[in-house]
Image (tube, rainbow, N blue to C red):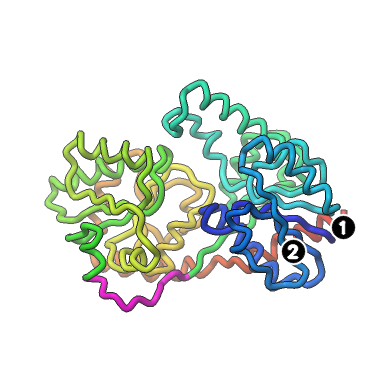
C-alpha cells in the first residue's frame, strides 16, 4: 500500500502537532516493513527528517498551512504519487483532495471558544477566518474514511458537533509523552535566579490563550498572597500578544509574585520542573493533556482544572480544582504549598500514570487502522 503522511507540521515548528506527527512517523518506521510511505514536508523541516526505513521517502511540499496553495497546489502534488491512502494529522485537509484519507482531530477548541479574544485579527477578518475554519474541518470530517481522535473526550466532542457522523467512524488513539529529564552539569541553584526565581514556585508552561484560563490563575495568586503563602508563579513561554495582555492584567491588579520567564531552553526547563512545587494546568478545554503527562514524567506534582478530558488522561494522579472558581484555584495552590506529603504522593502517582501511555502503541493502532481501510 502507498501511504502518504502530511508532515508539514513535523518537528518543533509544529509544536504539539509537530511532536505527534514526528512520533507517528518514527514509530511507524520501526514497526512497518511492508507498506511504502511518502512523507510530505515543508522547506523548514525537510532536512530535519532523515528516513530510517528504506520504505519511507520524503517529498518537498512547501505549501503554507491554511493558505490557498495548500488548497489548490497540494492536491495536485499528492495525485502524482498515486496514493492508496493519505493521513492528514490535522484538520486542514485540502477541500480539492479526492483520494482516500484519514484525519486526526486533536480538539475542537475553536468551535467551542469562538471568541475574538483568541485572535489579534480585526473582527471582520476573524469571523471570515472562523467561517473558513468551519468549512474546512466540516469537509474533512464528512469526507474522511476514518477520523482519529486523541481522547474519548475529543471523540464525544466530534460526535456532538457533527451529528450525522456514525460513532464507529471515530477511532481513539491516545498520544503519549517521553521522559524528558535531561542530564545537566549545571547546578539548579545557578539556573533559577537567571529567570528571576527567588522563592518556592508554581510552574506554568505554554501559551496563554483565553481557553487556557491564565487570568483566573493569576487572580488566585493574589488571593493566596493575603494568606501569607510565600510562593511565586512562573510563566514559561515566548512573549506574544497574549502574554503581553496577561502582563498588563497582572500590573493593573497589583499582583505580586508573578514571574514571566519567557522562552526557556530544555536543559533549564528541566531544572524548573525538578524544583517546582507543582505544575499548574488551569485550562478549561483541551483535546489531550500532554503537558500534564510531561510534568508527571519528570516527577512534578500536577494541579489541574477538573473537566472530563483531564480526568480521562490524568486519572487520580492530579490534584483537581474548579477552573472557573478563583477561590477554588487559590485553595488548591495553598493545599499543595502547605503539604510536602501531598506533593510526594502526587509525584509518585503521576510518574506511574505517565508510563501508561506509549507512542509505539499509538503508532501500532494507527497502522492497524491503515490496514483496515486497505481491506475495505
At label 2, counting other C-alpha atoms closer than 10 Å, the crowd grade (few under 14, some 14-19, many 20 or more) is some
Q: With 261 as the anchor, is 111 left or right in this view?
A: right
Q: Residue 57 — which label?
A: 2
Q: Which residue is mark 1?
A: 375
Q: Is residue 183 magenta?
A: yes
The residue lying toward the viewer, choosing from 180 and 299, is: 180
The residue lying toward the viewer, choosing from 328 and 20, is: 20
Q: CA distance from mark 2 to mark 1?
A: 24 Å
Residue 369 found in image quarter: bottom right
Residue 52 sits above or below residue 70 on the image: below
Q: Main secondary structure of the magenta part?
A: loop
Residue 112 sits above or below residue 202 on the image: above
Q: Is residue 187 magenta?
A: yes
Element type at marker 1?
helix
- The residue shown at (41%, 72%) is 181
The residue lying toward the viewer, choosing from 347 and 294, is: 294
- The residue shown at (26%, 36%) is 248
Percent of width and height locating residue 9: 59, 52
At label 1, counting other C-alpha atoms closer than 10 Å, the crowd grade (few under 14, some 14-19, many 20 or more) is few
Element type at marker 2?
strand
For the N terminus, the image quarter is: bottom right
Percent of width and height locating residue 276: 28, 63
Extent of the magenta region: 179-189
Can you name the residue that lies furthest to the top here? 124
Residue 324 found in image quarter: top left
Disc 2 vs disc 1: which is toward the camera?
2
Amino acid at each position: 500500500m502507498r501511504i502518504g503522511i502530511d508532515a508539514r507540521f513535523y518537528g518543533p515548528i509544529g509544536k504539539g502537532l509537530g511532536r505527534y506527527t514526528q512520533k507517528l512517523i518514527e514509530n511507524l518506521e520501526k514497526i512497518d516493513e511492508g507498506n511504502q510511505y511518502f512523507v510530505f514536508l515543508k522547506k523548514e523541516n525537510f532536512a530535519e527528517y532523515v528516513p530510517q526505513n528504506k520504505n519511507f521517502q520524503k517529498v518537498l511540499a512547501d505549501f503554507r498551512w491554511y493558505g490557498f496553495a495548500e488548497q489548490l497546489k497540494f492536491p495536485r502534488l499528492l495525485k502524482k504519487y498515486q496514493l492508496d491512502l493519505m493521513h492528514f494529522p490535522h484538520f486542514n485537509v485540502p477541500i480539492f483532495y479526492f483520494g482516500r484519507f484519514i484525519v486526526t482531530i486533536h480538539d475542537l477548541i475553536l468551535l467551542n471558544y469562538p471568541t475574538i479574544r483568541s485572535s489579534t485579527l480585526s473582527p471582520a477578518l476573524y469571523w471570515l477566518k472562523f467561517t473558513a475554519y468551519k468549512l474546512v474541518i466540516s469537509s474533512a470530517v464528512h469526507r474522511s474514511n476514518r477520523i482519529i481522535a486523541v481522547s474519548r473526550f475529543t471523540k464525544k466532542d466530534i460526535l456532538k458537533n457533527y451529528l450525522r457522523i456514525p460513532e464507529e467512524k471515530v477511532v481513539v488513539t491516545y498520544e503519549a509523552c517521553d521522559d524528558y529529564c535531561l542530564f545537566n552539569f549545571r547546578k539548579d541553584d545557578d539556573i533559577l535566579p537567571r529567570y528571576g526565581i527567588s522563592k518556592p514556585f508554581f510552574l506554568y508552561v505554554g501559551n496563554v490563550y483565553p481557553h487556557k484560563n491564565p487570568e483566573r490563575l493569576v487572580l488566585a495568586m493574589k488571593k493566596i498572597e493575603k494568606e501569607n503563602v510565600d510562593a511565586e508563579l512562573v510563566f514559561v513561554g515566548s512573549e506574544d500578544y497574549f502574554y503581553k495582555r496577561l502582563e498588563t492584567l497582572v500590573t493593573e491588579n497589583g499582583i505580586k509574585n508573578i514571574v514571566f520567564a519567557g522562552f526557556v531552553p530544555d536543559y533549564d526547563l528541566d531544572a524548573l520542573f525538578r524544583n517546582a512545587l507543582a505544575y499548574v494546568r488551569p485550562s478549561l478545554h483541551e483535546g489531550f493533556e500532554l503537558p500534564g503527562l510531561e510534568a508527571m514524567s519528570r516527577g512534578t506534582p500536577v494541579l489541574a482544572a477538573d473537566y472530563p478530558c483531564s480526568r480521562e488522561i490524568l486519572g487520580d494522579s492530579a490534584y483537581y480544582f474548579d477552573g472557573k472558581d478563583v477561590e477554588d484555584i487559590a485553595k488548591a495552590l495553598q493545599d499543595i504549598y502547605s503539604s510536602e506529603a501531598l506533593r510526594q504522593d502526587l509525584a509518585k502517582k503521576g510518574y506511574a500514570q505517565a508510563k501508561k501511555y506509549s507512542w509505539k502503541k499509538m503508532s501500532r493502532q494507527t497502522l492497524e487502522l491503515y490496514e483496515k481501510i486497505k481491506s475495505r
